[in-house]
Image (cartoon, rainbow, N blue to C red):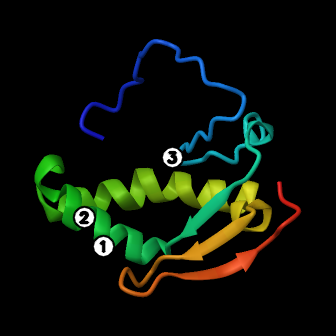
């Protein structure tokens, strides 16, 4: 978020039995969806995500109003497009509902996914 630039790190070789956990946004896009054996989708409503993001990033983005606008115009517009087109909750092996940080819950499990 601070620089919005790609990270260029050396490639690391893992053993076949290794477990690799990848955390990120838009990871079920069709062009990379087949790379994952199992997917976990952490669902947070856009309103809750916006409030959390504004609280977290207001200082870096120049204040609450600027942060709120950035989330509405850029981040949530892209997220809504992803949710509508890819439908990650329907494709995920497991879906957590994370609106309540004190009480996250498993919302759905699709054992056959992806």
**Disc number placed over residue 51 in the picture, else none:** 1
Mark 2 neighbour density, 10 Å: few (under 14) some (14–19) many (20 or more)? many
User: Which residue is located at x 15 percent, y 47 percent?
Assistant: 60
Position of residue 7 in the picture relative to residue 25 (left or right): left
Q: Secondary structure at mark 3?
A: loop
Position of residue 62 in the picture relative to residue 73 (left or right): left
Q: Which residue is mark 3?
A: 24
The residue closer to the viewer here, 65 or 84, is: 84
Instruction: Give how far across and how far down residue 69 sits, in percent.
Output: 30, 59
Position of residue 64 in the picture relative to residue 94 (left or right): left
The residue closer to the viewer here, 30 or 85, is: 30
Residues under numbered marks 1 and 2 in contact, where contact means CB atoms less than 8 Å apart: yes
Which of marks 2 and 3 precedes in the sequence? 3
Instruction: Give how far across and how far down residue 3 sits, in percent.
Output: 27, 31
Q: Secondary structure at mark 2?
A: helix
Q: How many marks?
A: 3
Query: Which of the two marks, 3 or 1, is nearer to us in this view?
Result: 3
**Disc number placed over residue 84 in the picture, else none:** none
Quarter of the picture holding the C terminus: bottom right
User: Which residue is located at x 84 percent, y 59 percent?
Assistant: 113
Q: Report which quarter residue 91 is drawn in.
A: bottom right
Mark 1 neighbour density, 10 Å: few (under 14) some (14–19) many (20 or more)? some
**Disc number placed over residue 54 in the picture, else none:** 2
Quarter of the picture holding the N terminus: top left
């Amino acid at each position: 978020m601070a620089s919005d630039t790609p990270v260029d790190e050396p490639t690391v070789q893992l053993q076949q039995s290794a477990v690799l956990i990848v955390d990120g946004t838009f990871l079920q896009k069709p062009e990379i969806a087949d790379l994952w054996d199992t997917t976990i989708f952490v669902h947070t409503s856009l309103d809750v995500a916006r409030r959390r993001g504004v609280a977290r990033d207001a200082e870096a983005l120049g204040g609450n109003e600027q942060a709120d606008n950035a989330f509405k115009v850029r981040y949530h517009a892209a997220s809504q497009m992803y949710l509508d087109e890819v439908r990650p909750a329907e494709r995920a092996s497991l879906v957590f509902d994370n609106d309540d940080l004190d009480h996250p819950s498993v919302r759905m499990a699709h054992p056959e996914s992806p």
